[in-house]
Amino acid sequence: MSAEIGTGRITTTPKPDIGLSETSIQGVTAILSRLLADEHVLYTRLRNYHWNLVGMAFGPLHALFQQQYEALADDIDDIAERIRMLGPAAPGTMTEFLQLATLAEHPGDLPDERGMVRQLVADHEAIIRHLRQDLRACDEQYDDMGTSDFLTTLMEKHEKMAWMLRAHIEERNQG
């Protein structure tokens, strides 16, 4: 692996010979790059809410938000490394993340604790919906069962994180 001087781009020599076509590698890395961007938006939102949370649920939510952004930090690293395993450079700037992300930023919007939890649940669920489509595409369209399996694991993590958050805003049925 060598860096092209002055370009900031990474070139890999030799290219991975792992049984995937160039088209498959491009398709899979596009999926992973979008996921990496969405994870960064969610990570940043979790940090923002962790820092700016107030109210009666401060203690448990503060800890839960920290637990989730720490888990996402590990996942973010794994996603970028998965991209690199396939050959291309991983996106790594905020500009790239905001261009690639499907999750929207909401500058200046700081909801109350229930609103924070609702927004985080919506973000996790949006990522889950994308992951369901993407893991099928990786397997069926791009013949990359390894990435499909990797995405399945990430989807299951997001399902658990969404559930943990939803439990804070669910109302007990009094009937």
Image: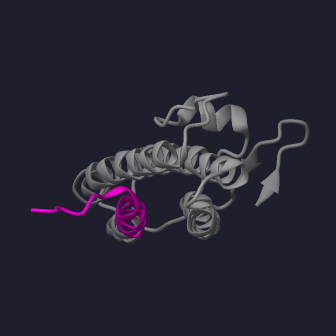
Q: How is the image coloured?
A: one colour
Q: Quick check: 6 left or right of 16?
A: right
- Closer-to-camera residue (145/70): 70
Q: Check residue 165 for magenta coloring.
A: yes
Residue 110 visible from this viewpoint: yes
Residue 25: image x %, image y %? 45, 51
- Closer-to-camera residue (117/27): 117
Kindly report the secondary structure that dominates the magenta region of the rendered protein.
helix
Please identify the quarter of the rendering in which residue 135 is found: bottom left
- Closer-to-camera residue (10/134): 134
Question: Is 63 drawn above or below residue 113 in the view shown?
Answer: below
Residue 52: image x %, image y %? 70, 47
Residue found at the far front of this picture: 174
Q: Quadrant of the C terminus?
A: bottom left
Q: Quick check: 83 left or right of 89?
A: left
Q: Quadrant of the N terminus?
A: bottom right
Question: Is 137 drawn above or below residue 8 in the view shown?
Answer: below
Residue 90 visible from this viewpoint: no
> For the magenta stretch, what is the residue range?
157-175
Residue at 39 percent across and 45 percent down: it is: 122
Residue at 36 percent across and 59 percent down: it is: 166
Residue at 51 percent across and 46 percent down: it is: 116
What is the number of callouts on the image? 0
Residue at 55 percent across and 51 percent down: it is: 39
Q: Check residue 156 for magenta coloring.
A: no
Residue 161: image x %, image y %? 43, 65
Q: Quick check: 137 left or right of 67?
A: left
Residue 114: image x %, image y %? 46, 48
